[in-house]
Amino acid sequence: MSIRDELNRLDEEMADELKSLDTLNALETLRVHMLGKKGQLTSLLRMMGQLSAEERPQIGQLINERRERFMKMLDERQAALQAKEREFRLQRERLDVTEPRRLPEVGCVHPNTLVLNEVVDCFTGLGFEVVEGPEVELDHFNFELLNIPKNHPARDAQDTFYIDDNVVLRTHTSPVQARTMTTRKPPIRIICPGRVYRADEVDATHSPVFHQIEGLVIDEGVSMGDLKATLDAFARRLYGADIHVRFRPSFFPFTEPSAEADLTCVSCRGQGCRICKNTGWIEVLGCGMVNPKVLEMCGIDPQRYSGFAFGIGLERITMLRYGIKDMRLMYEGDLRFLRQFRQDVKEG
Amino acid sequence: MKVSMNLLKRYAPIPVSPAEYQSRMIMTGTGVEGIEDLSEQLQHVVVGRVLTCEPHQNSDHLHVCTVDVGNGDPLQIVCGAPNVAAGQLVAVALTGAKLPGGVTIKKGKMRGVESCGMLCSGPEMGVPTELYPSVGDAGILVFREDYPLGTDVREIFGLNDHVIDFEILANRPDTLCVWGVARETAAAMGTQLSLPAISVREDPDADIHDFAKVEVLDADLCPRYAARVIRNVRIGESPAWLRQALYAAGMRSINNIVDITNFVMLETGHPMHAFDLDKVAGAHIIVRRAREGEILTTLDGKQHTLKGGELLICDEHGPTGLAGVMGGEESEITEGTHTVLFEAASFDRTSIRLTARSLGFRTEASGHFERGVSPQTVLDGLNRACQLVNELDAGDVASGLIDIYPSPVVHQPVTASVSRINRLSGVELSGERMVEILRKLCFQADVNGDTLTATAPDFRQDVEGEADLCEEVLRYAGYELIPSTPLRGVADGKRSASMHQNDYLRTMLSGMGYYETITFSFLAHKKLEMLGLPADDDRMNALAIRNPLGEDSAYMRTTLLCGVMTTAQINQAHGNEQARIYELGKVFDNVHRTAENLPGEYQHLCMCAYGGEEDFYSFRASVETLFSRLGVEYVIVPEAQPWLHPGRAAALCAGDKTIAVLGEIHPDVAEAYELSGRVYIAEIHLPDLFALSQPMGYVKGLARFPAVSRDLALVVAETQPVGPMMSAMREAGGKLLEDISMFDIFRGPQVGLGRKSVAFSLRLRAEDHTLTDDEIVRVMNKVLRTVSEKFGAEIRA
């Protein structure tokens, strides 16, 4: 058989084999069979010696053409097979994406902490610094400096836990304010969050341990209008832009004038409901202008400086914020309760 | 304080609805808890005359009556009361009438006879005997007085009224009476205050000094004591208006003299006491402190042994009453009383409060004195009582009065600046407007340029300076005028360092699936003992509360363990099968005290986990994560604590400090706490943790030269702890050993009994060049030599 015939036969063989094979392995075998060191085309090249000088370049060219064509054919077929194989694997790996799995559990801080963070963000944004102090406190700071002298009814054992005659569990975070006033010079702009104690039995709205956030501002020319604006900002931040603050005259020993600050009822938005006893307002915090006597006792000149103070019950605003009906849930630590909380990420 | 609105209106008109009144009072500083409409409960009940009364044909106890209710059309009513009879004046509930308890009267047939209404008994109308003495419990009410037929019985019973429940502020004891709220009402309503002019008609033939003598031995506790004497006392029933006023205030009517004293307290805020003067030995009142062990029987029949120091009212025989709290049994007013001594006084509020508290009872009177009764207005109470004696013709008032008032109190004018008041309030008011408001509140007030001068009325004890005047002016000008003026000036708002630190901890803990819990800072000593701590452990010496709510909350916690274990128990009891919880809070160190001699207060973190895949190592890993992310270098060492499993307890230490103790709860302790399964707990002393936290500094560049990995399986004795071995390897590896980790532990016959094969993976790298084989071999040999010398480790064949 002539080389030319042989080449034609190889063309046919190549076409047939390529057509019939369907694995990458078979393709590799064919590649070796055709183009390998001992492959068919290579053997033809070895037979070139038998050819005449004129024929040699022609045949050489034909063989080289074949080599290139075969390589191209094999590569194309390989790519097709690979694609088919991948397609097959992807089919095989198909999952039921709806099959349920247990979620990795991400915990959450206590609801008090969620709300405290909002409150602290609000006040630090207004230039307030967070200051903390001891929970077991000297009578001097908890009462005396706040214009609640010895034997004042507010100090009755029914309200205050005593350690001894001079030491109490702080009944508010105001002693932190007193400590700050005696150690720093105005301007002062602080908030004091923390745990406080009152000798109340536990029920749905009372607890012997709870948390307060008190604020204090002292500077020249501080007015009750400044207090109003500060609390307005707090109310809007926590409960929304439609919430307003209403001042109502009240009495606290360490402020004069004093006020109860009511907020638009967060439940009915002021329309009147059961929660606000149809008044449209809910009592949220006590505040007022720092009593000049307190300033004086703390070594601040009341002729030059004035200031305001306010006290927020953290549990109260947390319960309002999340509609918690029973305070006891807050201290029980039942995960069925705690798992419901998460950080809100939407504005107001 | 409950007050009848009708009574209040006698002194200050209220031209608005109750709801409007409530809101106006609240906004001017007088709290109103609520207003109850007494008339709502009883409607369409009128006075009627029983014309005829015949037995019912089908009943042995019912009667069929015809009743005239004044409209010319007598009603037929069937009545079952045994006392019904023709001619009686009775209360008739008409068809459609409403009775207390939601009862509505309908037309109906009783045993075949039509009945158009009901004849009422007192209880059916909710009318108490205190208010209307002719109301009896047996049968229907029969009026003794004559009333026009058809009169609404509410007018007779005084039920066309509202009861206002005032909430009195601590600094305004002067408003703890009708006149006090009347003053605030008139000012708030802008109406005319009309308190009665007090005048007493005295018997010129009798001089008080001939009948009684008063001595005050302890004037420090009794700044003022005043008395008057009533002779020829005619004890009797009080008139309806008086009974109704007392009823509305929640007080019982006793007799005219006692009712007068109670009414005067209600009206003027001055507690009064009436003595049967004939029973006062020597007709001589002595006010003094009690001696220790003195015995006194009060009006309520109780005997008290006194501690000494309580203020007493005595006669020549001894104590007759507890000053300002309760009178004595001996000199009580009775049917047979002929001569009465009225006492009106001002007692020291603290003394009264302490006395009432130590004897364990409070009375209306002591309540007033505790809040403060002005000595300046004592005579108003005393004379008002005598005026009522005159009006009620309850006796003859002897002339003159005894008034022991050694140091009279006189209010000094307060000087203030109009502009400073305005600066403080933020509201711009003229001096003239301030004077107008203050005068309405019974102050003497004047303004001269910027200077405001005001003298508080005698009944006010709370006005001391400019800030007080500011409040007075502002609450009547209206708190709603206060503008909203944002704070001026820039200030550096920031969280405290500890808040920052705790925030980061919380963020990490949330990420690891932990939930924050809060428990009380109290401790039951029993729960502390359940941990099995030795008696000399500092934590056993907890700070005690002098007046705790109970035994379970008698101490301040020295550890968070007890609270968190209890929380875990609650969760198990509530069916939560797995939990990761923590508490972040203070513990109180009673042993190491501060410079102020207060207990040390430290932030602790207590983590607890159970259920699911949790095991000792996963739990320890959570704790370690906190250390590692805070950049705290630590070593893990075995730990022994009584509440932890002896073989599953570890401490994380740095230097000589133990920062965290963790492990599986000891089965005995778990049992005591009613915990089931394996529960893991850790307590971390945060001040030390944060103190050791390294600042993160600058980042390192990423490695530019290749790393080499080598695995190493080492066989050691089972007892050999892996942690120290790995630390030693790390140290031996030096700078070139970039990382080392353990990936397997194998036990089995291949490695021999009592031995284990621990497989480590080491990664070596140099910062500045590609490692040579020589370097690698040197490092590996050093590591091997170290573990072989220190731990007897051999390379696994």
Image: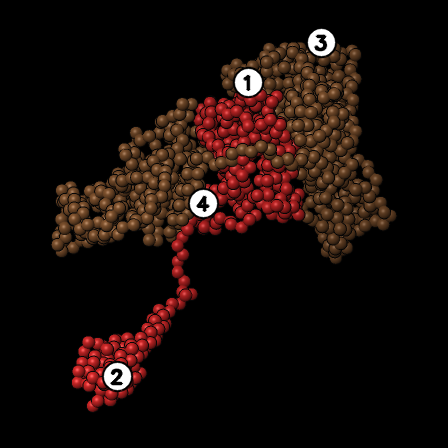
Q: Do the dots labelled 2 and 3 sit on one chain? A: no
Q: Do the dots labelled 3 and 4 sit on one chain? A: no
Q: Is residue B2 visible?
A: no
Specify the label residue B210 is tagged with.
3
What amino acid is at disc 4? Val
* Residue identified by numbered label 2: A58
Residue at horizontal 40%, vertical 49%?
A: B511
- 3 or 4: mark nearer the eye: 4
Among all residues in the image, which is located at the extreme bottom? A1
Secondary structure under the numbered disc 3 in the rendered image = helix
- 1 or 2: mark nearer the eye: 2
Image chain in red: A
Specify the label residue B310 is tagged with.
1
- 2 or 4: mark nearer the eye: 2
Residue at horizontal 76%, vertical 13%?
A: B399
Q: Do the dots labelled 4 and 1 sit on one chain? A: no
Provide residue A194's location: percent of width, then percent of height. Answer: 48, 35
Provide residue B784's location: percent of width, then percent of height. Answer: 16, 46
What amino acid is at disc 3? Asp
* Residue identified by numbered label 4: A109
